[in-house]
Image (spheres, rainbow, N blue to C red):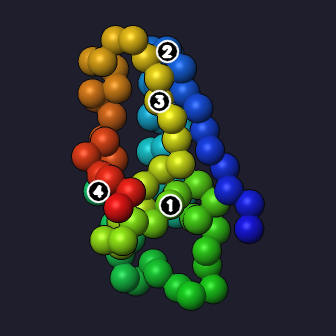
Amino acid sequence: MREVISIHVGQAGVQIGNACWELYCLEHGIQPDGRMPSDKQTQDDTSFSTFFSETGAGRHVPRAVMVDLEPTVIGLWPSFVDMSLV
């Protein structure tokens, strides 16, 4: 299985990355809190695992690195920021 890690640098990069991740969530049926509704989960469809990592709590977090010296832009990112990979 191939995995994609995206790197977003600077204000513009973080804002564009945020828009991309919102689209990835919509395309794969993942809610903003990282949960996937049970009606969307199938054993055969694992395409979302290319872009998302599943935590022990069953949430899906983006495989992404956001870098900016100004914390306000990254602070606007959805609730993925509060998730840990544990």
45 relative to 30 in the view: left or right: right
Check the picture and name the quadrant holding the C terminus: bottom left
> What's the distance in space between the residues labelled 2 and 1, CA to CA?
24 Å
- The residue carrying mark 2 is 10
> What's the distance in space between the residues labelled 1 and 3, CA to CA?
16 Å
- Look at the image and tell me whether residue 57 can be seen: yes
In the drawing, what numbered circle is on residue 53?
1
Circle 4 — which element? Answer: loop
52 relative to 33 in the view: left or right: right
Q: Residue at x 29, y 56 (%)?
A: 33
- The residue carrying mark 3 is 66
> What's the distance in space between the residues labelled 3 and 4, CA to CA?
18 Å
Q: Residue at x 47, y 81 (%)?
A: 41
Sequence-earlier tag: 2 or 1: 2
- The residue carrying mark 4 is 33
Instruction: Give the mark toward the camera: 3 or 4.
Output: 3
> What's the distance in space between the residues labelled 4 and 1, CA to CA?
13 Å
Circle 1 — which element? Answer: strand
Position of 18 relative to 40 (above/below)? above
Dot 1 amino acid type: Ser
Check the picture and name the quadrant holding the N terminus: bottom right
**Mark 4 burial class by Cα count in 10 Å: few <14, some 14-19, many 20+:** some
**Mark 3 burial class by Cα count in 10 Å: few <14, some 14-19, many 20+:** some
Q: Position of residue 10 (x, y in %)?
A: 49, 15
Q: Residue at x 68, y 56 (%)?
A: 3
Q: Which quarter of the figure has residue 40? A: bottom left
- Residue pushed farthest right? 2
Sequence-earlier tag: 2 or 3: 2
Q: Position of residue 73 (x, y in %)?
A: 33, 20
Dot 3 amino acid type: Met
Dot 2 amino acid type: Gly
